[in-house]
Amino acid sequence: MSLISKLKCITFDVTGTLIAYKGELGDYYCMAAKAAGKPCPDYKRMHEGFKTAYTDMAKKYPCFGFAAKIPNIEWWRTCVKDSFIRAGYEYDDETFENIFKRIYASFGSSAPYSVFPDAKPFMRWLRQKGVTVGVVSNAEYRYKDVILPALGLNKGSEWDFGVFSGVVGIEKPDKKIYEIALEMAGNVTPEETLHIGDSFRKDYLPARAVGMHAALLDRFKTLEAQKWSEEGAPVFPDLVSVQEWLTKEETIKVAGSNVN
């Protein structure tokens, strides 16, 4: 018996699993600064500044300010301003607002992202098989309402439900976000569900903790992938390989599989 015949639901992480960033963060910050008549910021300093600012904001106001009831745009305005300051760039209020509006609009569109070519066919194949398809992501509401649809990943054709941290106020690796996914899938059991992601800590471990099957993608041939396999996680290079694994006619012990 194939594994796919035992599953009623499959959930996906988004970034790194279904979509990827195009270019560098500095590309979009540079374009925004130039449009406001300012020089292009240093890419490396900008990247480091953003990484630190984002980490600090996520710790202080997790889930994009959900609990503190901070509007999404205000959360990002603070994060972007701090990113520039940490990178060594300070602008007057009017200039910063012009820069920020361009950055916020860019990352709320399909422009900075690309869809992996195997994502849409695989998701549609699952739904044709009668499998409920969900998305579980540490992302804000624009992924649900704007970004995924703009990329051609639509609710009703590629996925059935989505659990987004900025909407529900819980983020991975908290296993509660996976429990919410099971409920949204129609209260399917964990044993009937598979989660696919690209993070051992945020995807594999919490999904397994609630009793779901789990598998990881290593699309970029990372050094960590070998360790994931050694820890018992099934690891695949792409969704084509996952489809082959799911349809293989034999009993597979998911938690202990060692697939490369």
Image (spheres, helix red, strand yellow):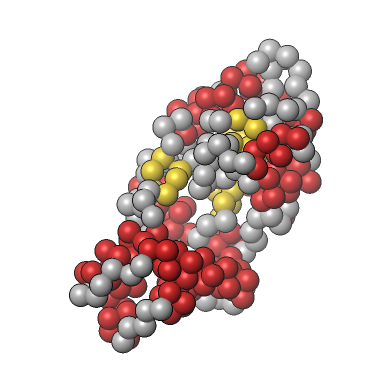
Q: Looking at the image, how many numbered discs can be counted on the residues?
A: 0
| Depth check, front residue: 134 or 28 | 28
Residue placed at 69% from the left, 50% from the top?
Answer: 201
| Depth check, front residue: 260 or 62 | 260
Residue 134 visible in this rendered orientation of the protein: no
Residue placed at 38% from the left, 63% from the top?
Answer: 43
Q: Position of residue 176 (x, y in %)?
A: 72, 55
With respect to residue 66, does 179 lie above or below? above
With respect to residue 216, does 74 lie above or below? below
Instruction: Choose top left, top right, bottom left or bottom right for residue 236.
Output: top right
| Depth check, front residue: 146 or 224 | 224
Residue placed at 32% from the left, 52% from the top?
Answer: 111
Q: Position of residue 143 (x, y in %)?
A: 45, 54
With respect to residue 170, does 123 lie above or below? above
Q: Position of residue 30 (x, y in %)?
A: 30, 65
Instruction: Choose top left, top right, bottom left or bottom right for residue 109.
Output: bottom left
Q: Position of residue 32 (x, y in %)?
A: 28, 67
Residue 246 visible in this rendered orientation of the protein: yes
